[in-house]
Amino acid sequence: MYDLIFKHLEEKVSLSQADKELIMTFFKPKKLKKKQFLLVEGHACKYMAFVNKGLLKAYNVDDKGNEHINQFSPEGWWTSDMSSFFSGENAFYSIDAIEDSEVLLITSEDFENLTLQVPVMDRYFRLLFQNSLITKERRLISSHTHTAEEKYKYILENNPNLIRRIPQNLLASYLGLSPETLSRLKKNAVFTVK
């Protein structure tokens, strides 16, 4: 259950066996069925989740009932409404499972204790949050400056395995496109999923 998270952690920091044993005590495993919620927009986010198996999406819903997807989280990714997780305020996003999934959950209190008791985890999360910030900034710039074709090509080149798992309507929402526009792009594209 913890092999993937340790592999992911050790890509950024070194862990002793004692560190690993202590880290496991801070996480609670949870299984989610397809379409089951981990977090509902408007409620406080109690957990940050590491995706051990499956695929989740983080999104908000506008006044017309349209989903606007912020993030897909496959195996090896973290997901949460970070603002709510750290502040205790209500979440801006909902998070649910696209596939049957298994996650490892940590509360904000346990997060603080983990980073104090295993100091190398403080460095790990700093690196993780830095990378997340860079990714979100690039995505924001892309949403304002790239054409629909450029957005689609970018995600095909950088996440080909993920694209195969995501229904077209969800991918369109993530890219800020209508399903019809995405369908047209796929039909006319000179580039394909590898």
Image (cartoon, rainbow, N blue to C red):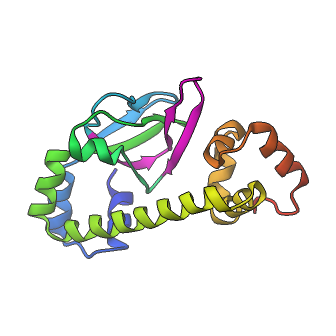
Residue 91 in the image: above or below residue 121: above
Q: Is residue 130 visible in the rendered structure shown here? A: yes
Question: What is the quadrant of the C terminus in the image?
Answer: bottom right
Q: Position of residue 71 (x, y in %)?
A: 51, 48
Q: Main secondary structure of the magenta part?
A: strand
Residue at the extreme top of the image, as rendered: 64
Q: Position of residue 123 (x, y in %)?
A: 24, 71
Q: Nearer the viewer, residue 87 or 18?
A: 87
Query: For residue 63: magenta?
Result: yes
| Residue 173 horizontal side relative to residue 82, left or right | right
Q: Position of residue 50 (x, y in %)?
A: 36, 50
Residue at the extreme front of the image, as rendered: 144
Number of callouts: 0
Q: Which of 161 and 67 is in front in this view?
A: 67
Q: Position of residue 26 (x, y in %)?
A: 18, 49
| Residue 3 horizontal side relative to residue 89, left or right | right
Name which residue lies at 60% across and 29% down. 66
Q: Give the range drawn in magenta.
A: 47-74
Name which residue lies at 69% across and 36% down. 169
Name which residue lies at 71% across and 40% down. 168
Q: Is residue 107 visible in the rendered structure shown here? A: no
Query: For residue 181: magenta?
Result: no
Residue 167 in the image: above or below residue 82: above
Name which residue lies at 35% across and 58% down. 5
Residue 33 in the image: above or below residue 3: above
Q: Which of 143 and 82 is in front in this view?
A: 143
